[in-house]
Image (cartoon, rainbow, N blue to C red):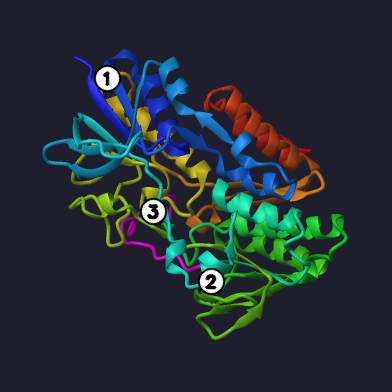
Amino acid sequence: MQKKVVVLGGNFAGLGAAQKIKEYSKDDVAITVIDRKSYLLYVPNIPAEVLENRNPELSLTMDIRKVLHKEHMDFIQAEITQVDPVKQTVTITPNERPGAEPQIIDYDYLVIAVGAKLAYDHIEGFAEYGDTVSDFYHGNKLRKKLHDGTYKGGPIVVTSARFHQGDGADGLAPYPGGSIPQAMAACEGPPVEISLGLADWLVRHKMGDASKISLVTPGKMIAEDAGEKVVTELLNTAAKMGFKYHNNVEDVVKLTKDSIIFANGLELPAELKIVFPDWVAHDFVKNIEHVADSKGFVITDLLMRNPTYKNIFAAGDCAAVTMPKLGAIGHQEGEIIGRQIALDLGHMSADKANEPLKPVVFCIGDIGSGKGFYIRSDSWFGGDTQVLKMGRIPYMLKMQYKDIFFNTDGKVPVWGEEVARILAEDF
């Protein structure tokens, strides 16, 4: 009899996990993906579309209904309201039209991959004065400011609010002697990317240069997950370009019309205030006893299983072990989940399936004018790799990755990362 697999979330981690489960367990699983929206939001390329005055809504969505149908998987568009791990049920409310009745879905295996909520509503003044590039609405809001003359060329601040991390990954050691560190920001690749891209945009539009931009972090070092060597190289480059840099600001307190105020007392003038928020857990996840950690993120081991309920897995930003909140790590986790369920169902040997998570920060960013940066690092977790490359090849890789992702319905070839490594690091 087929095992019922319910995957909560259909973006990078959820879709990737569903595809890997299907690939390894084939017809022994009946997979249902549930998401509040019917499309995958391709977040990494929103900054590039914004700066080039292209509407990201038109180029950065994938219809997951069609993708799942091709592979004989079901999709339900609904709000998820409750998980009962004892009864092995999920309560949902279909949301295609308001007023639908709650429904209960049962499962044999549950994969929680719903990402996190972005807590912009926790930042005083953000609604009136803030900008960001985390989604289509905010991306288009910033795009119009930049390209319709609303932005007058004043100072720009790019920063992250403090991330409040739970305790669900405490004690895990993905590398000998390493750990899953506590982070002050959820992910600081995007602030670095948009800052470098904006500097190029200012030059191209004859509105100034990097000296107008302050890059600010709540922590001791921006993008600390990339490793001290990589960050030092980035900051040296930024300093030569004229960027201002502030660290240890602790948190964002308030945005005003003309400034941004931080918890350490620093106040910076800013016409544009681009903020990346705290990432918080979804309410229904917070309420799952023995599954949610102190902040509502899903507790797993390094095989992505919950220690209490062995048939519950997590992948992507909702997993406590996912630090930083990075799509590439979500893909690694989806692969592990696919192998673990295949092991349970007799489709894979333990030697092959029980390869634990070894997180790698793999980040490629656009910095404008056909150039990009490439980072591959595991040093934050206890590894010994720190690589930074900048130039035209990283930009090509970023754009080609997006095209391959869409052309393969999200099934990036297994050789993709290795080819990217060779092109970026050896040429």
Residue under numbered circle 3: 173
Tell whether 102 sits left or right of 55: left
Q: Residue at x 48, y 37 (%)?
A: 12
Q: Residue at x 77, y 63 (%)?
A: 237
Name the one closer to the observer, 168 or 255: 255
Between the residue at mark 1 and the residue at mark 3, the CA separation in whole angstroms equals 28 Å
Q: Which mark is residue 219?
A: 2
In the rendered structure, which amino acid carries the disc numbered 1? Gly
Q: Amino acid at mark 2?
A: Gly
Sequence order check, earlier mark of 2 and 1: 2
Query: What SS does tag 3 mark?
Result: loop
Report the span colored magenta.
161-177
- Relative placement, left or right, of 319 versus 286 is right
**If you read the primary sequence from the N terminus, does the residue marked by circle 1 or circle 3 appear first?**
3
Q: Which residue is mark 1?
A: 346
Residue 6, placed above or below residue 29: below
Instruction: Give amino acid for label 3.
Output: Ala
Question: Can residue 44 be seen from the camera position used here?
Answer: yes
Instruction: Say what secondary structure mark 2 lies in.
Output: loop
Q: Residue furthest right?
A: 206
